[in-house]
Amino acid sequence: MTKKASWGILGMGVMGTSLSRNLAQKGLSLALYNRYLKGEEEGVAAERCQTYPELETAQPFEELAAFVGALESPRKILVMVPSGPAIESVLEQLLTLLAPGDILIDGGNSHFEATEKRDERFTAAGISFLGMGVSGGEEGALKGPALMVGGHAEAFGRVQKDLAQMAAKNSQGVPCLGYFGRGGAGHYVKMVHNGVEYAEMQLLAEVYECLLTQENPSWNLFAEWQQTESQSYLLGITASIVTYRENEALVIEQILDKTRHKGTGSWSSTSAIAQGAPATLMQAALNARFTASQKEYRSKMAAELTTINTKPPVLREITLKKAYDLVRWVNHHQGFELLKAAKTTHAWSFPLSEAAKSWTAGCIIQSELMQELTDLLEENQNLLESSRFKKCHQENRTALEELLTWGLKAKIPLPAFSAAWHYLMAISQADSSGNFIQAQRDFFGGHGLEWKNPKSNKGKHGPWHTKHS
């Protein structure tokens, strides 16, 4: 009789396969499942076991009941299925097959609100449900991803040791595994990770576009930056992307400038709006993707909204780097401020440093800066109020302003860099035009007013209005 497996992995796509290999390399016994679709997906789990030596002892299935029956009790199942109808279908089937005490983990890119509802449904059946954000792509999943978990604390405790083995280890040897509280907390943290990621990618795209305007641009610039405090995973892959050639031609120059997105990156911007948290870089990056996706319309408008073409001015590389270093601080600050706002709304109590720590290795936004931010957050410092940021701001703000001025002259859109500058100006403005907005709202809507000196109106809002008869 075949010994029952300690873990079940459901979904043998890129991520499910890599995570299976990761766990198998740690000595864990596995059962693997992939659905059967005639002519499309047949014998997938068995093929994975034949292809990868570390999976040769894993048990492959394409019949769900048999897969569940192959697991030791209480069962532990990691579901790696895309968000949407596919995961809803498989979860409904599992609900009829699992027993009280079993643990089910959704490791896909699910929306945190969907995770909340699933948690309630499975809890009612006595099954522990965990929502786990996984970041790192195919390579990270295999070698060690960043894992962000939410759901039942007791259930997390039962799988923590195995997940810690699976997770990436940062430079201090700490697993990039965080538990963030009940319900959809883990998927929410992963969602914010993706928002920060969108902005980081857009910033590098804008740097790339700036360099394109220069005569004989130095594509080794990214590799040089990677050896400094600017180091990050995304910067590292950028250094490879801009220099990669096939048949003597740069591949980047052969790629259509039409951006796609799966929609998950927009969730963080939507949540920021709901929280009333300014996440201006995430939103600028998202809108940049929307605009880039309209390739045909952009080509049409390029001919209709003609401008006088002039030779772009020379851009100093040091200006570009200094501006980049400053703006990355702003992006990360906004991400952590969004997490802080969500903690209040959803009554989550995790420290912000726990999120930062889980992002120090294995994930897409891992960087030297993230380790520094982890240290600051462990000291309960507000990032913009830290002496480290103030020093960065003092040294680099002029460079950011020089870059934006250059962009206007070169007619290069810099939405993320610009969003950061506007945020810094607005957040450090003691007196804003907010009083004018109040007056407008009261004029047409009678919404009432807040006074600079409440005593002048005996501490009341209104009934004075800006519209005088």
Image: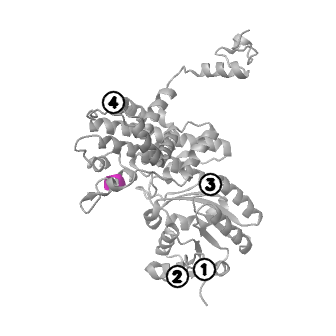
State the separation of the CA atoms marked 4 and 3: 41 Å
Residue 4 percent location from the top left of the image: 61, 82
10 Å crowding of disc 3: few (<14), some (14-19), many (20+): some
The stretch in magenta equals 237-241
Residue 240 falls inside the magenta stretch = yes
Quarter of the rendering occupied by the C terminus? top right
Q: Which mark is residue 111?
A: 3
10 Å crowding of disc 2: few (<14), some (14-19), many (20+): some
Q: Secondary structure at mark 2?
A: helix
Residue at 30% x, 42% y is: 211
Q: Amino acid at mark 1?
A: Glu
Q: Secondary structure at mark 1?
A: loop
Badges 3 and 1: C-beta atoms under 8 Å apart? no
Badges 2 and 1: C-beta atoms under 8 Å apart? yes
Q: Earlier in the sequence, mark 2 or mark 3?
A: 2
Q: Earlier in the sequence, mark 4 or mark 3?
A: 3
Residue 411 is left or right of residue 224, and the answer is: right
State the separation of the CA atoms marked 2 and 3: 31 Å
